[in-house]
Amino acid sequence: MSEKPVESLSKGEAAEELKRLAAEIAEHDRRYHTEDAPTISDAEYDALARRNLAIEERFPDLLRDDSPSRRVGAPPAEGFAKVRHAVPMLSLAKAYTDQDVTDFIERGRRFFDRDKDLDIAFTAEPKIDGLSASLRYENGMFVQGATRGDGAVGEDITANLKTIVDIPKTLKGSGWPETIEIRGEVYMTYAEFEALKQRSAAVGGQDYVNPRNTAAGSLRQKDPSVTASRNLKFFAYAWGYTTADPAPTQFEAVRKFGEWGFKISPLMVRARSVEDLIDQYHRIEEQRSSLGYDIDGVVYKVDQLELQRRWGFVTGEPRWAVAHKFPAEQAMTTVEKIDIQVGRTGTLAPVARLAPITVGGVVVENVTLHNEDYIKGFDSNGQPIRDGIDVRIGDTVVIQRAGDVIPQIVSVVVDKRPAAAVPYEFPHSCPVCGSPATREINEKTGKEDSRRRCTGELICAAQAIERLRHFVSRGALDIEGLGAENIDLFFNSGLVKTAADIFTLRDRRPAVTRALAERREEQARLREEASGKTRKNVRGVEERNYEGLDKLFAAIDARREPELDRFIFALGIRHIGETTAAVLARQFSTIEELIGVGKETAKAEDPHTVFPSINGIGDTVINALRDFFGNERNDDVLDALLAQVHPKPYVMEISDDSEVAGKTIVFTGTLEKMTRSEAKAMAERLGAKVAGSVSAKTDLLVAGPGAGSKLKLAGELGVEVIDEDTWLQRVGKA
Ligand code: IVH
């Protein structure tokens, strides 16, 4: 669809267009503010908003009640209680050039014109690319935490914020105001982001685009234990409502936050001149790539609070602060081809192969195109019409590494598009095995999954190889010496097709030796070609090789009786990561039990009539188990595997010398640091008995917030009551 210029719209068309734009912009607002998963760039969003405004200017009487020009941002997500910030959460004015910074300081000098000798000081600190949160402390206790929302009203995410280790539950030291709202940034490190991506890929879970959006999504979880598992971090850098100034200056105030137990940026400094500020800007910029988390600029703030107050605010922004943004690191290159990679769970992942280009000091050759929808989105005139970026083979693209390690395509230079370039056609069959590739409908949302998946499962070589790699990987069977490289070799030479074959390799020693020797030969030949030197000592290589083989066979044998949870994880069932595998192991104790229940569940019309209700196991996992155990092709593979491997039944190691051994314990109220089933398992491991209700036999009640009748009864019966932290201390887990 190509857009008509605003000047040539009829009134009827304009009305239609405004209606469409209102809906479209509202949807993008929602994606950006509520889901933290924007699907268009800021520039594209601005283009939509500008078009809306231009039409309204031409036809003022068509202004709609729900026009995007009437509102800013999106209302808080449903589901969390709203919190009105006692002092609004502001944003910052931006500076892009040194001149902008000079102007900022000049404005300040002019404002305080009459105080000729006034010595204005500033602070400079990194601008963290996360999302801001406001934390209310009363008498040193963390009582409520909220997102920024639209600046005036945010969402109450106290329970989730409590899981962040950098956020103290009670303030340390002394001298804190009776009530103070500490403000700062919640963010995710690259390391954590990569680990999460890997965990998710291992179970065929969702795709994560960047640390910022992932941090935001992690904070909006209904279940705080999910937030906890994301290991978010927090820097304190400002405050809102307070009953007393924390200190006379910004610098000292933030230092105080550090004394009270917060993490504060070690890169914050005090400066007095434009030169000092710009110096610090460059110093921080130099450290940017080694910080381990995203920053997107440097924030300058007037240091003296008294001057901050005098200088005041403009709409939504303090006059006394400015964010000096880093230029995005961008470069242009061309797309040579688009490959489709097939993951263990069959996901078809498109990757653009680029003519190598250096962006921000790193050579970029590949860039993910995320999924099918992402590679659509421009009409024949180069106008954005849908989500994503219409990337074609041969296109010139702008690549960006905006501080993140992950390069992305920011735009396509449509002017440079070769005449013959056609929109990329996403394959509907698997490039590896040829099976149909389909998009599933998410049962919860009813929406189509953004990713296309190969339905070939067991016949698909790509999936098979990824499954095998997973099977021997660290959290799974962890077979030493059997890494991805050897798996590839054994798979490609036909020695290992399924996991069971790994355990019969010893019986095929001559063939294994041949495969390894052939690879050595090949590698030596390649080295020789590369260096021009002749080969020596080939025999020696082969002899060492035999020695290695005995080690490999021994390592394989050493894993014939794996722990049950590792074995379940190793099976590579979708959505079953290490944690879920451990929960299942605890619940079912033996693999036979799990298989039995899995098969019954697969047969049952309503899985819940068969599958027990287990804390931490929801429909996604139950359905994945149904699919796996209901698939007859998996039976043979599993039977063959279990003929070789005997997972150890799960036995709880019960200790009898712990403080709680032999005691009867009841948990009540909300537990904040662990799930009920974890708490129960922990108590049982320590030799305690866990009961569901309080009676005269109860020795100990562990009560979290919201405890009711059980707490009351315990009081009446004189049962000892402790909170979760004390419990953790007592069992040595605090
Ligand atoms: S100060 C009154 N300091 O940037 C000043 N903000 O564009 C309030 N941000 O919403 C903010 N690092 O999410 C401040 N060191 C820093 C920051 C920072 C990141 C974010 C914050 C704010 C946004 C404004």
Image (tube, helix red, strand yellow):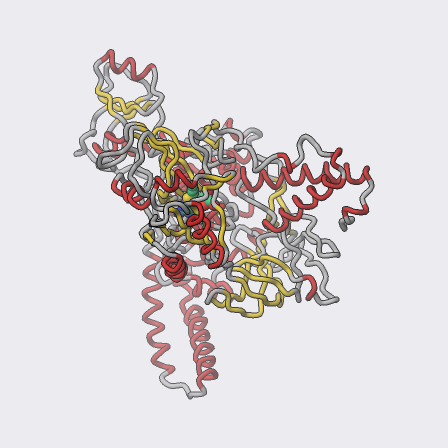
Q: Is residue 556 above or below residue 65?
A: below
- Describe residue 136's horizontal placement relative to residue 110 as left or right: left
Q: Is residue 319 above or below residue 423?
A: above
The quadrant of the picture showing ligand 1 is top left
Horizontal and vertical percent position of residue 161: 38, 36
Residue 437 vs residue 109, the one in the foreground: 109
Q: Residue at x 70, y 64 (%)?
A: 415
- Describe residue 441's horizontal placement relative to residue 717 as left or right: right
* Picture mark count: 0
Residue 9, quarter of picture? top right
- From where the camera sits, is residue 17 visible? yes
Horizontal and vertical percent position of residue 340: 60, 59
Residue 708, quarter of picture? top left
Horizontal and vertical percent position of residue 341: 56, 58
- From where the camera sits, is residue 196 visible? no
Q: Is residue 607 above or below residue 372?
A: above
Horizontal and vertical percent position of residue 546: 35, 72
Q: Residue at x 21, y 32 (%)?
A: 730
Residue 578, quarter of picture? top left
Q: Residue at x 49, y 53 (%)?
A: 95
Q: Quadrant of the C terminus?
A: top left
- Describe residue 461's horizontal placement relative to residue 22 as left or right: left
Furthest residue to the top? 716
Residue 399 vs residue 573, the one in the foreground: 399
Q: Residue at x 44, y 39 (%)?
A: 312
Residue 445 vs residue 137, the one in the foreground: 137
Residue 382 vs residue 125, the one in the foreground: 125
